[in-house]
């Protein structure tokens, strides 16, 4: 009988990766085929047995209480690393989802440990209802019923009593819950995520205020994460990767101070703040109104000056004082400037003349046209109104909504034309000309930093999510120095099925901790420190290195020479989290190393 067919009591002894089993790929990792079939996802967790009932919360609690998850112990709260009034930190087991309609999740586990008052009341009421109709005259049963009635009246009853005396009904009620919103008084709130297969430090808040503090720390990148991993092959950073020179190291420093990441995030917010309907330079309704109003006010002022200037010129001619230029109402004279032929070509050459014509015809001219559905007198009155006053009139609001649409369409068309002209111009540049243009400095995919340990190196490769598949894609430009096999497996074009992929800059610091063997094959224990938080970043960066993570069914299975060494869990563990909490004091939470003695 195979190990997958053994009972749960035998299965829990194999939490450390086994040399005999292969963890089956989850339905999520199989891609879009399962999603399209709209079937219930069935997981096969490394801590469960072969039967589906061995994958539920009761089975997970049995495994935890057996002391098979580090830290080793005999009580269910041993994987709780930290517990205070504001936060709880757990050492998340591997192969456990955050939430959702699954037999066991982090949400269900924490709800069991910290049941809300509404859940306790439901469980106690159910117990009273069930035993209140029991006609058994046995004296002991009557005493039990009395105890349960007392518990119903005691709303502050101890959670430990609920978990021991009424565990069956408690687990039944929890099985109906999918996420935090299932119970309005659930105090536990997640502040970040860990992948299904990843174990380790997971921080959760007990109040909205605490959650806001933690989420802000993750959002502004003031946290530091460290992961432990076992990867395929013996990694040799010292002999394989170059040390950055001066210019490259300067670019790297901008990574470390967060300026490049902040620039990317600012651009991303700008592009998505209107649900993908915007672009660089896009103006909303109130901004177009302000621009229209400024244009009309300048035109009105210019007409007044010209009118006053015309009156002054007429008076000057009558007085016999002709001028070579234009005399304004102020009495000052603008002399006619005589320009050379070269200056005229420079100021009015084909390029500039065309650009100016485009700028006027495609965007600014929209603001100079008369507004629709109103006469000239009413249009003049609109110039003196504020946007707040415009919004109060549905007719005026609709007029400027249409004007905004026309303006942005013209501006986008202008930008696309200029982009196309620039692209064609770049193609026409000869090799001799291009050699004089300085090449843009960029970081290599793999590199080391002068002064750091010889076992430390960095991986720099942009990643992109694809909504149609579980997998994440690597920018093909980032893996040109990798082997053809790596390029063919992990590289994807910028356009996939007619859709543009948005590649996000990603950087990971890697440190070799130990080289050895597992199941007769060379492996390396790594410390991974992500400088960005992209989805599947560590898994994919290790994959393009040619040393995918041991047990990674999604990315290691396609890497030549790694299929036969799979284990029953993915060897990626969130080891340490450093985060400012409470008056910006740095807190450090550590989940013990589960891979001790593995290699």
Image: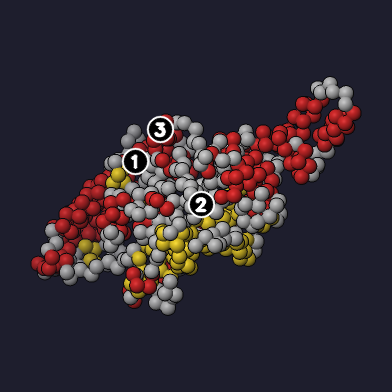
The residue nearer to you, when weighing 207 against 271, is 207
Q: Are marks 3 and 2 in contact (CB under 8 Å)?
A: no
Q: Residue at x 62, y 33 (%)?
A: 176
Callout 2 secondary element? loop
Q: Residue at x 71, y 41 (%)?
A: 116
The residue nearer to you, when weighing 399 against 467, is 467
- The residue most toward the left is 341
In this rendering, the label closer to the viewer, 3 or 2: 2
Query: Could you tell which of marks 1 and 2 lies nearer the N-terminus?
Result: 2
Residue 557 image label: none
Horizontal arrangement in the rendering, residue 73 relative to residue 548 (left or right): right
Query: Could you tell which of marks 3 and 2 lies nearer the N-terminus?
Result: 2
Residue 12 in the image, given as x and y percentages of width and height: 60, 47
Callout 3 secondary element? helix
Horizontal arrangement in the rendering, residue 94 relative to residue 493 (left or right): right
Q: Which residue is mark 2?
A: 18
The residue nearer to you, when weighing 175 against 222, is 175
């Amino acid at each position: 009988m195979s190990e997958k067919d053994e009972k749960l009591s035998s299965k829990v002894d194999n939490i450390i990766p086994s040399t005999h089993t292969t963890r089956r790929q989850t339905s999520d990792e199989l891609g879009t085929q399962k999603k399209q079939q709209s079937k219930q996802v069935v997981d096969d967790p490394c801590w469960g047995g072969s039967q589906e009932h061995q994958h539920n919360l009761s089975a997970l609690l049995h495994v935890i209480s057996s002391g098979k998850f580090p830290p080793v112990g005999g009580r269910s709260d041993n994987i709780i690393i930290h517990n205070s009034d504001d936060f709880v930190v757990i050492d998340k087991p591997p192969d456990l989802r955050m939430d959702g309609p699954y037999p066991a999740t982090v949400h269900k586990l924490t709800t069991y440990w910290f049941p809300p008052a509404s859940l306790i009341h439901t469980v106690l009421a159910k117990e009273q209802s069930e035993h209140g109709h029991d006609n058994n005259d046995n004296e002991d049963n009557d005493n039990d019923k009395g105890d349960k009635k007392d518990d119903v009246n005691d709303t502050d009853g101890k959670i430990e009593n609920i978990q021991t005396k009424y565990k069956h009904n408690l687990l039944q009620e929890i099985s109906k819950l999918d996420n935090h919103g299932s119970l309005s008084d659930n105090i536990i709130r997640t502040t970040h995520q860990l992948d299904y297969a990843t174990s380790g430090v997971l921080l959760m808040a007990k109040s909205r205020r605490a959650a806001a503090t933690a989420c802000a720390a993750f959002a502004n990148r003031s946290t530091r994460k460290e992961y432990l991993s076992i990867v395929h092959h013996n990694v040799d950073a010292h002999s394989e990767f170059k040390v950055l020179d001066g210019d490259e190291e300067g670019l790297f420093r901008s990574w470390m101070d967060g300026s490049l990441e902040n620039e990317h995030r600012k651009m991303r917010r700008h592009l998505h703040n209107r649900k993908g309907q915007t672009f660089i330079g896009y103006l909303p309704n109130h901004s177009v109104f302000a621009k229209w109003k400024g244009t009309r006010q300048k035109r009105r002022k210019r007409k007044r000056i010209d009118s006053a200037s015309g009156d002054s010129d007429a008076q000057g001619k009558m007085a016999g004082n002709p001028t070579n230029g234009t005399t304004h109402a102020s009495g000052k004279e603008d002399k006619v400037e005589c320009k050379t032929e070269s200056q005229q070509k420079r100021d009015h050459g084909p390029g500039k003349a065309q650009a100016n014509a485009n700028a006027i015809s495609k965007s600014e001219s929209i603001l100079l046209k008369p507004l629709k559905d109103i006469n000239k007198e009413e249009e003049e009155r609109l110039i003196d109104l504020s946007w707040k006053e415009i919004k109060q009139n549905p007719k005026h609001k609709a007029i400027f909504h249409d004007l905004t649409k026309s303006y942005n369409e013209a501006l986008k068309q202008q930008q696309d034309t200029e982009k196309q002209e620039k692209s064609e111009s770049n193609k026409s540049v000869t090799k001799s000309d291009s050699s004089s243009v300085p090449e843009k400095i960029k970081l290599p995919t793999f590199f080391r930093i002068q002064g750091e340990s010889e076992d430390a190196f960095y991986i720099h490769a942009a990643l992109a999510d694809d909504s149609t598949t579980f997998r994440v894609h690597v920018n093909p430009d980032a893996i040109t120095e990798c082997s053809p096999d790596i390029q063919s497996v992990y590289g994807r074009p910028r356009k996939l099925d007619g859709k543009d992929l948005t590649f996000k800059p990603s950087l990971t610091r890697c440190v070799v901790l130990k080289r050895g063997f597992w199941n007769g094959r060379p492996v390396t224990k790594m410390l991974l420190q992500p400088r960005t938080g992209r989805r599947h970043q560590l898994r994919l960066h290790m994959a393009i290195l040619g040393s995918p993570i041991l047990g990674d069914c999604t990315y290691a299975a396609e890497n030549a020479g790694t299929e036969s060494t799979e284990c029953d869990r993915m060897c990626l563990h969130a080891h340490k989290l450093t985060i400012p909490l409470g008056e910006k004091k740095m807190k450090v939470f550590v989940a013990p190393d589960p891979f001790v003695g593995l290699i």
